[in-house]
Image (cartoon, helix red, strand yellow):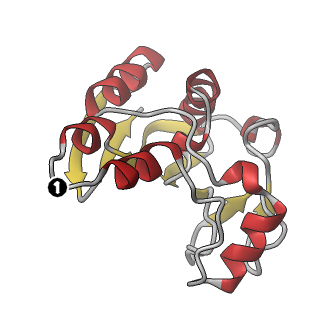
């Protein structure tokens, strides 16, 4: 089984696509991971792969660590999680980005309708709490958090203003 947690409009075939918004057209399971445990919906050690693109930064650090622990519990031994978040260190240090761009990338503003995707704009109106960032991750802080949880192999690479971390249980 593969999970796409916080899928938004990124619906993926072959995955269980999970989002907290019921304003989206294609979601397999509506679960608010801020308040509802994934372990209430899936058996421990039953998942091969978890994709968490642009979702972990939308939680306070302690909430994010709780969610990452749930990922660990859900994965079977050898299972992998892929996490994409904004790269706070790169964003802060970048001389190419304006202060306003840095603030938007780090703290959000994603709750403001963008005008590019009507479905996402409807979700933004209904669930603005899902669209602001609550914690800034660096590659080091993410790797340390995952290692403390028990992931054995943790690697990351920067992609644009984000980084992608792969962690194996």
Q: Please identify the quarter of the rendering in which residue 30 is found.
A: bottom right
**Which SS class for mark 1?**
loop
- Relative to residue 150, is residue 125 depicted above or below? below
At 17% from the left edge and 55% from the top edge, which residue is drawn?
96
Nearest the camera: 55 or 105?
Answer: 105
Q: Is residue 28 visible?
A: no
Nearest the camera: 145 or 159?
Answer: 159
Work out which residue is located at the far top of the displayed protein and give it.
148
- Relative to residue 117, is residue 142 depicted above or below? above
At 57% from the left edge and 55% from the top edge, which residue is drawn?
109
Residue 83, position as x, y percentages in the image: 42, 47
Residue 12, position as x, y percentages in the image: 55, 75
- Relative to residue 67, is residue 131 depicted above or below? below
Would you say 119 lies left or right of 135 here?
right
Q: Please identify the quarter of the rendering in which residue 56 is found.
A: top right
Work out which residue is located at the far front of the displayed protein and give it.
99
Identify the image quadrant of the C terminus.
Answer: top left
Mark 1 highlights which residue? 96
């Amino acid at each position: 089984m593969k999970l796409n947690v916080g899928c938004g409009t990124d619906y993926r075939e072959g995955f269980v696509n999970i989002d907290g918004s019921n304003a989206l057209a294609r979601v397999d399971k509506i679960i608010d991971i801020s308040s509802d445990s994934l372990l209430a919906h899936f058996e421990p050690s039953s998942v091969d792969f978890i994709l968490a693109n642009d979702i972990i930064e939308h939680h306070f650090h302690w909430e994010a660590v709780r969610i990452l622990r749930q990922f660990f519990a859900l994965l079977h031994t050898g299972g992998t999680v892929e996490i994409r978040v904004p790269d706070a260190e790169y964003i802060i240090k970048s001389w190419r980005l304006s202060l306003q761009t840095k603030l938007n990338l780090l703290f959000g503003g994603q709750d403001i309708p963008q005008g590019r995707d009507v479905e996402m704009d409807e979700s933004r109106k209904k669930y603005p709490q899902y669209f602001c960032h609550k914690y800034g991750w660096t590659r080091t802080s993410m790797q340390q958090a995952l290692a403390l949880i028990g992931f054995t192999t943790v690697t990351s690479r920067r992609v644009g203003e984000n980084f992608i971390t792969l962690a194996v249980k």
